[in-house]
Image: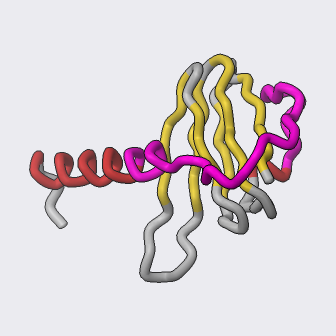
Amino acid sequence: MENTDQNVRILDMSSNIQAELLANRVLPNSVAFERRTNTFTLSNIPPALLKDHKTSVWAKLVVEKGTLTFTEIANSEHDQDLSRTLNEEDTQVISPEVLHFVTLEPEVSFHIEFYK
């Protein structure tokens, strides 16, 4: 494929759509807050969060400072992974049983809330 301005615009639109799909996810009304993790940074993040993993309950990732990228792994070969960059005070709802991982920028801090 030739690298033209139009191709770049299509890729940008695709990224924006992915981010919007993730940003619009909300917790179901039927769940209640259960607990939250300590604050994570580059120096104390559990290595498992940087690899494909999933939760058994609903969760919400809350960025306290800095920037990270949340990526949700496609559940079939016909789907695409979804990624979204989150900045300070952004949140990301995470569905149960969906593979995902985070990529951290140097000065990020965040925590995760769990809901049942």
Does the magenta-highlighted stretch encompass residue 109? no
Magenta span includes 23: yes
Q: Is residue 28 left or right of residue 57?
A: left
44 versus 7 height, above or below: above
Which quarter of the figure has residue 55?
A: bottom right
Q: In the figure, residue 104 lies in which quadrant?
A: top right
User: In the figure, is residue 88 to the left or right of 57?
Assistant: left
Query: Does residue 91 appear left or right of residue 14 in this picture?
Result: right
**The residue stretch that appears in magenta:** 19-47
Residue ID at (54%, 47%): 26
Instruction: Tell whether 74 sits left or right of 98.
Output: left
Residue 76, percent across and down?
A: 53, 81
Position in image of residue 42 (x %, y %): 79, 29
View extreme (front): residue: 30
Q: Residue at x 58, y 26 (%)?
A: 67
Q: Answer above or below: position of 4 versus 106.
A: below
Image position, residue 58 (x, y; %): 72, 54
Residue 56 falls in image quadrant: bottom right
Give the main secondary structure, helix, strand or loop, of the magenta stretch: loop
Residue found 61% across the figure and 48% down from its top: 27
Q: How many marks?
A: 0
Task: Tell me: residue 34, above or below residue 48.
Answer: above
Q: In which quarter of the image is the N terminus?
A: bottom left
Indicate whether 57 appears above or below 44. Answer: below
Q: How is the image coloured?
A: secondary structure
- The residue positioned 41% from the left and 52% from the top of the image is 21
- The picture places residue 92, in percent across and down from the top left corner, at 59, 41
| Front in this rendered view, residue 18 or 34 | 34
Extreme bottom residue here? 77
Q: Which of 87 and 113 is in front in this view?
A: 113
